[in-house]
Image (cartoon, helix red, strand yellow):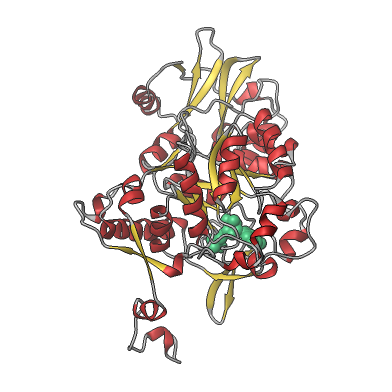
Amino acid sequence: MKAEEALRQGFREKFKGVQVALTFRDVFILPGKAEVEPSEVDVRTRVTKIHRLNVPFVSSPMDTVTESDMGIALARHGGLGVIHRNCAVDEQVQMVKKVKRAEALIIRDVITVSPEDKVGQVLALMEKHNISGLPVVEGTKLVGIVTGRDVRFAQPSLLVKQVMTKDVARAKEGTSIEEAQRLLRDHKIEKLPIVNEAGELSGLITFKDILLRGKYPDAARDENGQLLCAAAVSPFDLERAKKLDEYADILVTDVSHFHNANVFKATKKLMSEVSAEIIVGNIGTYEAAEDAITELERVSGFRVGIGSGSICTTTEVTKAGSPTLFATAQVADAVTKYGSDIPIIADGGIRSPGDVAIALAAGASAVMIGNLFARCQESPGTLITIGGRYYKQYRGMGSQTARAKRYSLDRYSMPSKGVPEGVEGWVPYKGEASIVLDELVSGLKASMGYAGAKSIQELWWKGKLAALSPSGAEEARPHDILLPSETQERI
Ligand code: XMP
């Protein structure tokens, strides 16, 4: 709309038919006819155009939520971690590499040593990468293997060729996992080098990886059997994005207001320079999604919601925002209108499995969570006790202390604004991420069971939402009873 036309319509017009931006606390799911039991509900989803998850949970790229440990834990249980960027480029790259190296069907970027290297160097490599055996290569040809046992008590000045096992069991490229497992067992070894016709090392299969595959059958993996890993980037930091592109499966733009001409321009460039899939956001309106769909060529996913995060003060400070639930429906309609298959990740404000179900019913394919994952053992930071209870630190990336590190400053505009848009504090400790995920998945399945939806796609059209009145909201909680948590004498 042009300026004169808008002014002609008058300022009073702005208040007519003003939209109601409903949030998670305003609505609930109406029960629908169910043909499946909650245990039979399928919560598998797509997080990008290509990548699939077995549970619809993604962790926020925040420095009190997602580093390697969280990335590994979530991917092992079928979700996805987005490694934060509030650190030097190399640190972020190392974190992504750690997730990618945690498991593999066949390790392709094998760490090797040469026969002329010293035992001391081998020990240092083993410690640095937390591995117990290294193939020995002359050029690219496999000539032996050194394990912890070979070097642990050897003089650091000895040469690898003096301590290595020369007659090393090996398998040909194309060997099946079952055959590899048999070879590992028959030779009583932990690592099986893979060689090509010329005897050159082309990969490594480890017993640990085979065990982990069995232990985490629902893990989110890439085609090489490695855990999926995403990383946050600023569209303005091309150098960082290019380095991460070598290892991360997915890049996630980390911008609080993506619908901005400069951000679009920088993202176009980013998309032409990297090969990873790119999730863009955050956006909060139909128009933002429409512009992204029509102007950007390689959008692999939308990160949606502005100002709903539990640590956000954006809306309080700026009076601008788009609550996650409202934003999700806006973007979902644009995606449908353009016949696009871009998945939506509803980001911020999720406090319960029911919130997840509502976000999915509003058109999301997955949700992004900071607060609930910050409570886990795998989030960065140590436990603290307050009043005899355990807590972990949790802070907004726009909070004063997160901004002090400066790496994420541009999330909150370019050049950065002077006002903090987040707070910091503590969240109660919950234990391992798998516990939180189990609760979320069981609760989500129960909600979907009530909605009568056996899959997330079915929830999109079967999930009917209704608004809660203030008295309805009160009735929906336990009432007229004194709960143990409300008594003076807490246990
Ligand atoms: P939850 O509700 O899970 O939300 O804590 C996490 C999401 O909040 C966003 N985020 C912020 N938003 N100021 C904001 O306005 C901040 O300082 C901030 N830090 C994180 C982000 O989208 C995250 O995924």
Residue furthest to the left in view is 35
In the picture, which quadrant includes the C terminus? bottom left
Residue furthest to the top in view is 198
User: Which residue corresponds to the image point at 60% horizontal and 47% vertical from the top-left?
Assistant: 281
Q: How many marks?
A: 0
User: Which residue corresponds to the image point at 76% horizontal and 65% vertical from the top-left?
Assistant: 419
Residue furthest to the bottom in view is 488
Is residue 97 at all visible to an observer of this figure? yes
Is residue 131 at all visible to an observer of this figure? no
Q: Nearer the viewer, residue 294 or 489?
A: 294
User: Which residue corresponds to the image point at 26% horizontal and 62% vertical from the top-left?
Assistant: 31
Instruction: Establish if 296 lies above or below 328.
Output: above
**What percent of the width, then of the height, locates residue 4?**
72, 53
User: Which quarter of the figure has residue 8?
Assistant: bottom right
User: Which residue corresponds to the image point at 61% horizontal and 35% vertical from the top-left?
Assistant: 296
Q: Is residue 287 shown left or right of residue 207?
A: right
Q: Is residue 309 shown left or right of residue 430?
A: right
Q: Nearer the viewer, residue 383 or 443?
A: 443
**What percent of the width, then of the height, locates residue 136?**
60, 22
Residue furthest to the front in view is 8
**What percent of the width, then of the height, locates residue 246?**
63, 31
**What percent of the width, then of the height, locates residue 285?**
56, 52
Image region (quadrant) for ligand 1: bottom right
Instruction: Establish if 331 lies above or below 19.
Output: above
Q: Is residue 447 shown left or right of residue 231?
A: left
